[in-house]
């Protein structure tokens, strides 16, 4: 996926994540290499991840920015102690989420 997400795409992703439970929780050990591996695995399999900051609540903005830069994910929302991240699967067959966007133009029929 290239570029930033548009407002309609962010709204769509927030709607998908709204009732979902937090898939991961960042605890007292913080952003360890093991946590990053789990985060990467979850993104690869689910595309949309809800993360709860159990600890480090004051540093949630900085930690979210680090996760974005380290994984290439997009920060969809950060409300309270919960953040939502999205990264489209590179394999088109494994993609679970279809983002709204501009309809693709069909080529003009040959005359």
Image (spheres, grey):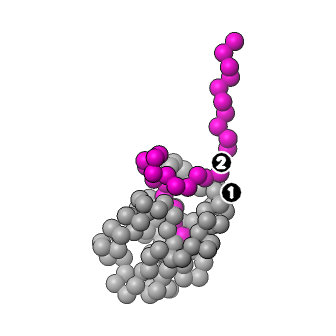
Q: Where is residue 4 in the image (x, y as percent from the top left)?
A: 56, 54
Which residue shows up at 57% across the image and 73% down it? 20
Q: In which quarter of the image is residue 28?
A: bottom left
For the image, the number of numbered tags is 2
CA gap between label 1 and label 2 equals 8 Å
Q: Position of residue 34 (x, y in %)?
A: 30, 73
For label 2, the residue is: 101
Q: Is mark 1 on a helix, strand or loop?
A: helix
For label 1, the residue is: 8
Residue 61 in sight from this viewpoint:
no
Q: Tell which residue pokes out farthest to the top in this image.
A: 111
Q: Which of 32 and 44 is in front in this view?
A: 44
**Quadrant of the snapshot with the C terminus:** top right
Q: Tell which residue pokes out farthest to the left in this image.
A: 33
60 shown above or below 103: below
Which residue shows up at 54% across the image and 76% down it? 21
Q: Position of residue 59 (x, y in %)?
A: 47, 82
Which residue shows up at 47% across the image and 62% down it? 46
27 shown above or below 15: below
Q: Is mark 2 on a helix, strand or loop?
A: loop
Q: Which of 110 and 55 is in front in this view?
A: 110
Q: What stretch is highlighted in magenta?
A: 83-111
Residue 29 in sight from this viewpoint:
yes
Q: Tell me, yes or no, whether the highlighted magenta stretch contains residue 57.
A: no
Question: Could you tell me what secondary structure mostly forms the magenta stretch?
Answer: loop
């Amino acid at each position: 996926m290239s570029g930033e997400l548009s407002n309609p795409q962010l709204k769509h992703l927030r709607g998908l994540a709204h009732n979902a439970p937090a898939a991961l929780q960042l605890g007292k050990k913080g952003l360890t290499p093991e946590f990053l591996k789990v985060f990467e695995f979850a993104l690869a399999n689910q595309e949309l991840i809800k993360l709860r900051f159990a600890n480090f609540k004051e540093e949630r903005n900085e930690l979210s920015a680090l996760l974005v830069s380290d994984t290439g994910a997009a920060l969809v929302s950060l409300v309270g102690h919960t953040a939502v991240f999205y990264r489209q699967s590179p394999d088109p067959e494994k993609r679970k989420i279809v983002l709204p966007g501009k309809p693709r133009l069909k080529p003009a029929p040959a005359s």
